[in-house]
Image (cartoon, coloured by chain):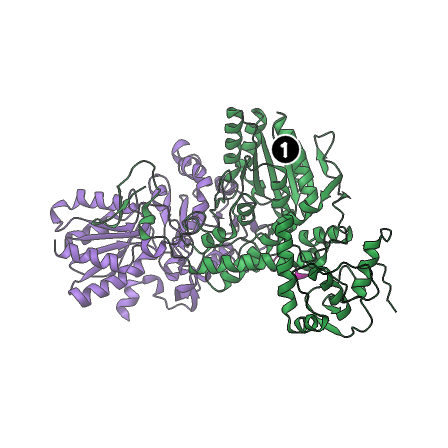
Chain colours: A purple, B green
Amino acid sequence: ALIYLLKYPYLACLRPTQKMNLFQSITSALDNTLASDPTAVIFGEDVAFGGVFRCTVGLRDKYGKDRVFNTPLCEQGIVGFGIGVAVAGATAIAEIQFADYIFPAFDQIVNEAAKYRYRSGNMFDCGNLTIRAPWGCVGHGSLYHSQSPEAFFAHCPGLKVVIPRSPIQAKGLLLSCIADKNPCIFFEPKILYRAAVEQVPEDPYTIPLSQAEVLQEGSDVTLVAWGTQIHVLKEVASMAQEKLGVSCEVIDLQTILPWDIETVCKSVVKTGRLLISHEAPVTGGFASEISSTVQEECFLNLEAPISRVCGYDTPFPHIFEPFYIPDKWKCFEAIKKMINY
Amino acid sequence: MIKRIQPRVLAKPQSASARRERALIHGPSHITGRWRFPLSANSRRAQSEHTLTQRQIAGRLCPAVGSCAFYLPIFKTAKKPRAGRTHPDIRTVLRWVRSGKMLAIISNVFRASAQRNGAAVIMSARTYADFTTQATFEIKKCDLFKLDEGPATQVVLTRDEGLQYYRIMQTMRRMELKADQLYKQKIIRGFCHLYDGQEACAVGIETSINLSDHLITAYRAHGYTYTRGGTVKEIMAELTGRRGGIAKGKGGSMHMYCKHFYGGNGIVGAQVPLGAGVALACKFQGNNQLCVCLYGDGAANQGQIFETYNMAALWKLPVIFICENNRYGMGTSVERAAASTDYFKRGEFIPGLRVDGMDVLCVREATKFAADHCRSGKGPILMELQTYRYHGHSMSDPGVSYRTREEIQEVRSKSDPISLLKDRMLSNNMASVEELKEIDVEVRKEIEDAAQFATTDPEPPLEDLCNHIFCDMPSLEVRGTNPWAKLKSVS
């Protein structure tokens, strides 16, 4: 228990916790923000009644309709508007209804939000902006409700991209993103909205960004993922331990950009093998960035080629989803091949 | 005593045939009793729809079996039975009626007569009663923007057109309800945006444009897929994701395509610039075709729509922009989403029309007007169809958290497109109740068969996962979840 408290210092003071699932922890984080920061505003499509995933339930009644309001159906407008709010000094939390719809706003995010501080020589910035979007496959989402676009934004310096894996991380990371003085995109795994339930502290707390978390220590293989895929890899790690006697180190990257190179490389130096897994298509997915950086840094420590278990290079399919996603068997197979290399 | 009913229908002077008909219907007095029979009375609103006296049955049987000599002693001039055909006597006939066999015999006879006549199967072989072949209706005037004159307010609807519209709308309605049912049974998964309530829009538009014209719409596309040429079977199989589907099972509810119908698009508002592009191609090729580009009231606030208006007006593209205003953009009512709810004026420099989208004739006339406008080279035109959807935004939306059930019921009872058409046709003697019921029965059967097919058809093969990514690159190796597991894209 003591080790647990030391490992998770944000739980150290044994604050009152409540059983919450992912969307409730998001609501709690937003509640804390609106309470502590009088300039905070939340806006997006349908956020007033609580949002399509119930992330903003009750906030409008509590804080008023000038702080929690709906926008019309215009993503480019939402993000552009959010950048303006942030530049003027208020804390803006914009919601894009699904990550698949973030593309009309891509220009605003990449060309305006990310470059504001740089191009104005630090005179202006939109660090008060946080964009939240539901992310990832959900079992029946098909082409436009299942995408994982973190790789598109990883290519853009000036932004921070963060993906939590569970309610406790979600609340802490969201609060860090809001507090952070850079524009942040916070992707929430939609399949975990109801499925992931944890005892989450009611008070605000932050989890540092750009720090990967080692969930499980191991000595043979390093497994890196983020969001929903972490839970798959945890299961794969236990399968590998049981069936192959392989001890796996599981790392949750948490922040995609800027990512924690040190933790991952230290781990690879220890184990010599790396497996990276995500749902997005493999070509140009974020695993390719991790892979190439790791081989640069730890080339001589590698025992086997770095393995990427990702989605196929196709649009996210409708009926073929169970074949498309990198499930535990594919990861397990990859570990077997790496061990026997 | 023969009960005299003066229906509004038979207002014509009584010819001999009409008199014979009345006598046949009411029959001789020795036939008594009532029989529950699916044939409903011939516009006899005074009587209940589902029962006929046996006199009436007997009266109807006579034309079918070809003679009434044995049956009505009062008509000595009745025709003799034809040689080679034996007629059943009345007791046999009534036994058949009681056993329910008559329905089969009658429908067979009618089918035979229909084949002879080449007409569609009509339940009542109303050789004696005339349907009016066409009627003129007064429709609502459209609000105009930047137009001097609008579409006609006096429209002619012929009987055949009316029956056709009724059939198509009823098919669409039943198809959507079936999809609702299958979704609740989890046979259809994913997203399903239903079109019931808005059928008049699809039918009205389609009747005014040719199949060679182009159409593109957003995700509420099942109705348009049907009017543009898809069959119910293909649509339902696409919803369930089977290989018999119209997009081979790879698209699902939101991505259905057929010839000159460009879908079925998931991203809100993204289809409007595409529609303008199609129109540009038509203009460039000089084929006198136009593009109908639909979007909803929620999408009307997207930036790309305004960019498209500008391009279309600048280059005078033959595009009809149609905003299907069903008052709610998912869960947000139009007052809460739009600074100006006059969507037909949003084009600013594009002329606009506001049309009652629940009346198929209004939509037809307005689209005809708009099509003429485009084809004459005057450039784009914008139409707002005021319509309503009964279901929620999609199957995951109950549809009642942002509007009241009373509102839905009110629209359903006052402005349902199918009921409006039906009332028009019945009150002007353009069809009979049983004729329309027969259409309903056929439609229901078609939908059942399609649902059966959709449930039992096999899913597309796994190889299809990687097909159709690129063109002309056969045997492209598609990298996948593992470095050694590559799938081949063969098309």
Q: Which residue does the image show at 17% across and 62% down from the upper left? A: A247
Q: Nearest the camera: A190 or A173?
A: A190
Q: Which chain carries label 1?
A: B
| Secondary structure character of the magenta stretch overall | loop
Give the extent of the magenta segment: B402-406
Quarter assignment of residue A330: bottom left
Q: Where is residue A69 in the image (x, y as percent from the top left)?
A: 57, 50
Q: Quadrant of residue B109?
A: bottom right
Q: Residue furthest front?
A: B83
Residue A20: quarter of image: bottom left
Q: Is residue A39 left or right of residue B482?
A: right
Q: In this view, does B344 lie above or below B48?
A: above
**Looking at the picture, how far across and down is residue B96, in whole percent?**
66, 71
Viewer-proximal residue among B245 and A193: B245
Pinpoint residue B453: horizontal percent, then vertical percent: 46, 58
Q: Quadrant of the N terminus of chain A?
A: bottom left
Helix, strand or loop for disc 1: helix
The residue under label 1 is which amino acid type?
A: Ala
Q: Which residue is nearer to you in this view: B66 or B427? A: B66
The answer to whether residue B308 of the structure is visible from this angle is: yes
Q: Within 10 angstroms of label 1, few (less than 14), some, or many (20 or more) residues?
A: many
Residue B397 in view in this figure: no
The tally of labels here is 1
The residue pinned by badge 1 equals: B371
Which is nearer the eye, B274 or A52? B274
Left or right: A251 in relation to B140: left
The x and y percentages for residue B404 are 66, 60
